[in-house]
């Protein structure tokens, strides 16, 4: 497996070397001949790699690959030095051009000396590569041209309690365990250890049990703790406390920690999951469970424990275990594994292909009842053409000396469509097991490492290709996608992580290239001195008082990626500017509050990630010299933080979270104009300093199709309006691809027409626009899902204009109705809106409801808010009547509200929550709700005490509360 990683490394680097060498020919005359020689030799060697892959078992071939790897790394480093020098010259020329001074004579001798030294290095590399090329012939390797990939190809473990959807074959296990947990018990604490080998689905089963509704009904407290390593009693209680409080525990003393846990558990039955346990010391478990039982004497609490190791399960005291033995999780049946595979390979309802049916027996033998194996094989078949299925399955049956899971993973790895994707996969193992990785973060690392290169036509960004690589790894089940409460991240199963780490392990290479060090896990102070100087990726975590001279980073001159974390270091050394090859610098978890000016000499730097709000002194002055910068991952809430001068020179920039407009030269909004690759989210502040429409248009937002979210902010506070702000907003017209828009402190009297033409807009926030008196026709936005209206104090009514009904339309509709006797059109208003929030609208008096809209347009069948799930009205003291057709209505602090009118769609209402509406006297007739209403909550309504009516409440109780609202006497 390790040799496969070397082969992939060499292929990726050789491709880079050939590409860069060819590009540089003719650009540097002093080394032109050697570059051409290097390009030709590397191309010749590249042809031998396909044959070397098939003979990787040969010791001679393995040694040949390692020698080749060393030389290719040297070549890549030297060419990168050449690239850096070209960037340095470009920055220098550009800066002097800006100053109208172009003079390079003074540096010509240095340039000649540099080129001479470079030519000598490349000459030595060429000699060694030619020797290696000759060695290929002596090993019997033949020069082959690899087939191009298909056109469509491109620390401690942590788990969580989020349930896995569509689990196959575990419903019986779940029911048995839930029944045990729900049964009466006279014990203070009972334990169910679930044991079984990796890949069997123990954590998945534990998640299903944890999220079962019966668990919520039977236990007052739930806690999920991933152990994932050997740990002492204090450490385990610390994890439990963090799970209960959802905050990091800073104290280390046992007494303080267990007393905190006692306070959280006292008097309640609790359900505790300890996932992925490894400690088998009997004494440790006795100590732990005795302490846990002493913290809470309430009977009926349970602990569910998962482990790969049977002797760990057996170490749990027998008197605490149900049935005096662990719960051994069995394998899935063949049909269940087949169901998983079909779900991966085919769409729902699709017939099983003959090619797949013919391989069923062999595939199921390989799965051996392991759901992970079935998922991996299914993902592997899904990403390959049918004619390759037979050979893939045959390969997975070989190499019986490997563990079954590793055999499957090895085949999945071998069949990744390119060496670059193999490198991306293996690189993921440098992150601690089960790290939650964001898509952008992962791809930025891959690009920084050189695993993702532009396509030959240069029509797509490298990040787009990285996204394709990520999708291939997902389809191959080598990465997992997790969606939780609106956020998406990626993880590796622990067995897949172990496999990827074996691919990346140091033994696979002559030199270490990747290293992660953590001082909190016993890092010796002299450890850093032993790190090979050739290392290219360094993750360094420093805490606990480990004294480290940060200038030691200068030893690692080949670094491409540097990720620093911990708060024991508060500044970067000025020597950071000498790491010429650095592509990615991540100090987002560091206590650093300022950046040295020398940072601006990192002309190769592509990604800079800083802890949000950390820069107290602002950006370095020469920030615009970072000519290769693609991602500035930093956010700051202060509008007075000065942006780097002439940010418009950073023409590669894609990620910029905010821009604070200033009147100073080089800090105006026009700097955004040249940043045509911006994507994701951008907040623009201080828009009051923009002089007008033409000035705003210089930002060229309309020409930035990859910006998905924009926030426009003027200065807060009252001020006179001279229509300039309307002109500025008009000039800030975004590209039609925009999905989310926020407008804050705008003092114009109207919004521009382009707002209602944003056909892909899903989220709109309008806040503190105090002069605006009439809402735009938002009801005509076809994709709008979430709408937030806050502190629009000049809005007095929500009427026809809000829905997009014009006076002309009303007259035309009336005429059509008179002529034909009925309406011929079916209109839709807010066709996609799911959430509507109206907050602190102090002068809002009138709201035109759905029934009134239908009456206005003359269409009984018109769709108004057809998919609205949630409507929240807060602090609208002048509103007297509220219309509603949604699933969930929350009303709070509406002092003059007297009635809630339910019209069309009332039968779908499931929840009503009413708080602090002192004059509310009328709810709709109960019969209108049908059987949909599940929860009615009132508090401080006409002075009443809180009332909650839930799903199990009899209908007569709902009716009683409704009558109470109609009759004030019930509250006196």
Image (cartoon, rainbow, N blue to C red):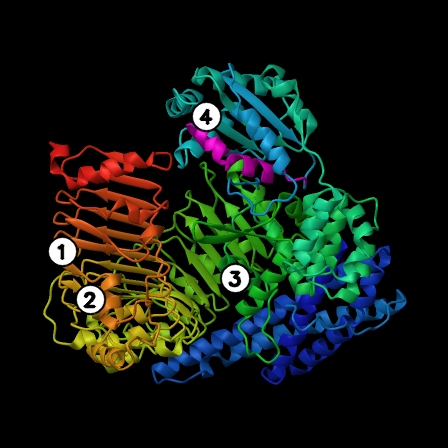
Q: Nearer the viewer, mark 4 or mark 3?
A: 4
Within the image, what quadrant is residue 627 found in?
Answer: bottom left
Q: Say which label, 4 or 3, has the lower sequence index.
A: 4
Q: Nearer the viewer, mark 2 or mark 1?
A: 2
How many residues crowd mark 3 within 10 Å: few (<14), some (14–19), many (20+)?
many
Can you tell which mark lies on residue 444?
A: 3
Within the image, what quadrant is residue 596 found in?
Answer: bottom left
- Quadrant location of the C terminus in the rendered image: top left
Contact check, label 2 and label 3, Cβ < 8 Å? no
Figure disc tally: 4
How many residues crowd mark 1 within 10 Å: few (<14), some (14–19), many (20+)?
many
Residue that label 4 marks: 270
Contact check, label 2 and label 4, Cβ < 8 Å? no
Nearer to the camera, 101 or 394: 394
Query: Considering only vertical position in the picture, is 293 above or below 311?
Result: above
Q: Say which label, 4 or 1, has the lower sequence index.
A: 4
Secondary structure under tag 1 reads loop
Q: Say which label, 2 or 3, has the lower sequence index.
A: 3
Measured in 3D between alpha carbons, the distance from the residue under mark 2 to the one under mark 4, in whole angstroms, is: 51 Å
Measured in 3D between alpha carbons, the distance from the residue under mark 2 to the one under mark 1, in whole angstroms, is: 17 Å
Residue that label 1 marks: 842
Name the residue: 42% across, 63% down.
Answer: 632
Residue that label 2 marks: 799
Q: Say which label, 2 or 1, has the lower sequence index.
A: 2
């Amino acid at each position: 497996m390790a040799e496969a990683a070397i082969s992939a490394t060499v292929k990726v680097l050789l491709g880079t070397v050939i590409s860069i060498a060819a590009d540089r020919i003719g650009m540097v005359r002093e080394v032109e001949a050697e570059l051409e020689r290097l390009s030709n030799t590397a191309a010749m060697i590249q042809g031998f790699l396909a044959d070397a892959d098939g003979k990787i078992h040969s010791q001679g071939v393995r040694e040949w690959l390692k020698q080749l790897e060393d030389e290719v790394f040297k070549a890549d480093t030297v060419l990168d030095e050449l690239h850096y020098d070209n960037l340095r010259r470009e920055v220098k020329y550009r800066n002097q051009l800006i100053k109208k001074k172009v003079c390079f004579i003074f540096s010509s001798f240095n340039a000649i000396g540099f080129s001479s030294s470079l030519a000598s290095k490349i000459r030595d590399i060429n000699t060694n590569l030619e020797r290696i090329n000759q060695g290929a012939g002596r090993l019997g390797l033949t020069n082959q041209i690899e087939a191009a990939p298909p056109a469509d190809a491109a620390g401690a473990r942590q788990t969580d309690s989020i349930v896995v959807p569509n689990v196959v074959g575990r419903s019986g296990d779940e029911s048995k365990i839930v029944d045990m947990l729900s049964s009466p018990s006279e014990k203070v604490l009972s334990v169910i250890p679930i044991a079984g080998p990796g890949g069997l689905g123990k954590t998945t089963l534990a998640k299903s049990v944890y999220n079962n509704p019966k668990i919520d009904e039977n236990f007052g407290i739930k806690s999920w703790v991933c152990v994932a390593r050997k740990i002492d009693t204090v450490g385990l209680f610390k994890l439990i406390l963090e799970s209960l409080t959802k905050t990091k525990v800073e104290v280390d003393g046992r007494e303080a920690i267990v007393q905190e846990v006692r306070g959280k558990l006292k008097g309640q039955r609790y359900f505790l999951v300890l996932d992925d346990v490894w400690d088998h010391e009997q004494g440790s478990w006795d100590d732990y469970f005795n302490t846990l039982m002493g913290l809470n004497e309430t009977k009926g609490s349970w602990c569910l424990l998962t482990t790969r190791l049977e002797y760990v399960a057996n170490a749990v005291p027998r008197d605490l275990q149900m049935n005096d033995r662990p719960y051994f999780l069995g394998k899935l049946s063949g049909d269940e594994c087949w169901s998983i595979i079909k779900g991966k390979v085919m769409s729902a309802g699709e017939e099983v292909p003959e090619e797949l049916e013919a391989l069923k027996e062999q595939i199921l033998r390989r799965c051996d009842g392991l759901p992970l194996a079935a998922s991996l094989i299914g993902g592997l078949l899904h990403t390959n053409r049918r004619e390759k299925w037979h050979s893939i399955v045959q390969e997975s049956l070989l190499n019986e000396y490997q563990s079954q899971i590793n055999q499957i993973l090895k085949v999945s790895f071998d069949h990744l469509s390119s060496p670059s994707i193999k490198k991306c996969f293996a690189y993921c193992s440098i992150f601690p097991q089960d790290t939650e990785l964001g898509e952008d973060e992962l791809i930025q690392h891959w690009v920084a490492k050189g695993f993702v290169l532009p396509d030959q036509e240069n029509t797509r960004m490298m990040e787009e290709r990285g996204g394709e690589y990520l999708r291939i790894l997902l389809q191959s089940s080598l990465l997992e996608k997790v969606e939780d409460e609106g956020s998406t991240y990626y993880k590796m199963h622990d067995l897949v992580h172990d496999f990827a780490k074996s691919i990346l392990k140091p033994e696979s290479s002559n030199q270490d290239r990747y290293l992660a060090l953590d001082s909190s896990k016993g890092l010796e102070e002299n450890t850093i001195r032993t790190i090979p100087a050739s290392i290219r990726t360094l993750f360094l975590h420093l805490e606990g008082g480990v004294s480290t001279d940060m200038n030691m980073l200068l030893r690692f001159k080949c670094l491409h990626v540097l990720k620093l974390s911990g708060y024991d270091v508060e500044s970067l050394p000025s020597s950071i500017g000498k790491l010429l090859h650095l592509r990615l610098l991540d100090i987002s978890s560091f206590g650093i509050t300022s950046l040295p000016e020398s940072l601006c000499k990192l002309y190769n730097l592509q990604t800079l990630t800083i802890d949000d709000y950390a820069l107290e002194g602002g950006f370095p002055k020469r920030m615009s010299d970072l000519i290769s910068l693609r991602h500035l991952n930093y956010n700051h809430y202060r509008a007075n933080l000065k942006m780097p001068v002439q940010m418009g020179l950073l023409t590669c920039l894609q990620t910029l979270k905010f821009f604070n407009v200033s009147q100073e030269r080089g800090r105006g909004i026009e700097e955004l104009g040249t940043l045509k690759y911006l994507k994701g989210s951008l907040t623009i502040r201080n828009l009051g300093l923009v002089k007008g429409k033409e000035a705003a248009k210089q930002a060229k937002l309309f020409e930035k199709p990859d910006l998905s979210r924009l926030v426009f902010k003027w200065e807060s506070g009252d001020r006179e309006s001279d229509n300039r702000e309307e002109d500025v907003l008009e000039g800030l017209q975004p590209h039609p691809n925009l999905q989310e828009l926020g407008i804050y402190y705008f003092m114009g009297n109207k919004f521009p027409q382009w707002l209602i033409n944003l056909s892909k807009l899903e989220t709109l926030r309008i806040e503190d626009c105090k002069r605006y008196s009439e809402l735009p026709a938002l009801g005509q936005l076809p994709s709008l899902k979430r709408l937030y209206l806050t502190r629009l104090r000049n809005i007095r009514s929500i009427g026809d204009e809000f829905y997009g009904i014009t006076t002309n339309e009303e007259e035309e509709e009336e005429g059509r109705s008179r002529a034909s006797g009925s309406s011929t059109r079916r209109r839709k208003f807010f066709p996609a809106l799911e959430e509507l929030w109206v907050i602190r609208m102090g002068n809002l008096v009138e709201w035109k409801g759905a029934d009134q809209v239908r009456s206005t347009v003359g269409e009984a069948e018109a769709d108004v808010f057809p998919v609205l799930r949630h409507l929240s009205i807060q602090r609208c003291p002048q509103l007297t009547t509220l219309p509603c057709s949604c699933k969930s209505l929350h009303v709070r602090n509406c002092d003059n509200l007297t009635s809630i009118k339910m019209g069309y769609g009332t039968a779908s209402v499931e929840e009503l929550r009413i708080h602090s509406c002192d004059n509310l006297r009328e709810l709709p007739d109960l019969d209108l709700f049908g059987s949909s209403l599940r929860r009615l909550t009132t508090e401080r309504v006409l002075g009443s005490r809180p009332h909650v009516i839930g799903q199990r409440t009899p209908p007569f109780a709902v009716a009683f509360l409704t009558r109470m609202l109609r009759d004030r006497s019930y509250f006196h």
